Amino acid sequence: MRKIIVIIMVISLADIYAQGVDTIKTNKWVPSFLVGFGINQIAFSNWVKGGDNSISWTFLGDFHYDMIGPLWNFKNQIKATYGRSKNGDGVYKTTDNDLYVENVLSYNVGWPVSPYFSNSIRTQISTGYDYRTTPAIPVADFFDPGYVTQTLGVTYDKYPHIVTRLGIGLQEVFTNIYRQYSAPDNSKKAFQLETGIESVTDVNYTIDNNVIYTGKFRFFSQFKSMDVWDVRLDNIIAAKISKYFSVNFSYLMIYEKAQSPYTQAKEGMQIGITYNLL
């Protein structure tokens, strides 16, 4: 049922945007699709100096479908990362597991800032496990938890590499089995509605001819607890080695008190194939 809800929401937003585009005949949708795949493997045979077989791989897909017009701007993104690894005779473990969908509609009224409406979805692609225990314990799944946020506010995009927006947001937290994310107060509620302030800043900066930095910084605070902020800082530095090969360094920092009282961090280095399909 949760999968159907997500699919319906994405299709509904796409249909709304498509209807808006029909009224602006002079503008066109511009798609872009970046895919990346990295793999690391080592195998031993009669090796006397120690070591163990291992294999790990990571997949990245980043799809954009945007339309920039004199009055209306429609920006849509679907980003997914998924990775697994295996050492020796052990089982495969999930190392990356993230799905992010964002739709932003803004209107140019001739002011320094433009009003906008956005919808975003954050969840996992598959079951996530805590591997610090034996056996591993499942702690999350697809849309369990799932975060859906609608925000109405103003955006500023006059800088060439930075777009920032600020607005009033509604955030829905959906869960099924893992209700600690929607009910940190141990009330066992499967759904949590939060109202507050959301700030999102996107950075896209070319460091060198073949080196690009992209970042997305999100802050959200509920009106009832303005001294506590959810923080998500997503950073990627991509260096192009050749036409098809690149090196990517990523660093993600998250602080969400409902999930953990501690700051979470994830760092990754990927050398692999990157290709622009569109």
Image (cartoon, rainbow, N blue to C red):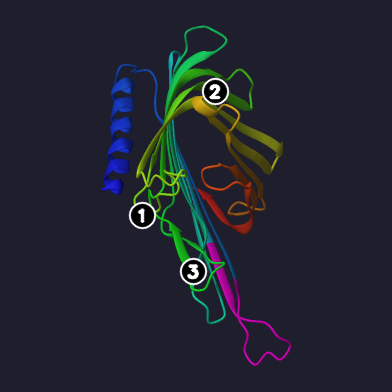
Whether residues under marks 2 and 3 lie with C-beta atoms below 8 angstroms apart, the answer is: no
Label 3: few (<14), some or many (≥20) within 10 Å? few
Give SS at disc 3: loop
Report x, y in % for residue 153.
48, 18
Give SS at disc 2: strand
Give the mark nearer the N terminus: 1 vs 3. 3
Report x, y in % for residue 104.
44, 27
Instruction: Say which residue label 2 marks.
Output: 165
- Residue 136's mark? 3
Instruction: Say which residue label 1 marks.
Output: 177
The region drawn magenta spans 41-57
Identity, as a three-letter code, of the amino acid under mark 2: Arg
Residue under the point 53% across and 82% down: 89
Residue under the point 62% across and 26% down: 162
Of 262 and 66, nearer the camera is: 262
| Magenta stretch secondary structure, dominant | loop
Of 72 and 153, nearer the camera is: 153
- Residue 23's mark? none
Q: Spatial distance from mark 2 to mark 3, Cα to Cα?
A: 40 Å
Label 2: few (<14), some or many (≥20) within 10 Å? many
Residue under the point 68% across and 44% down: 210
Q: Is residue 125 magenta?
A: no
Give SS at disc 1: loop
Q: Is residue 66 visible?
A: no
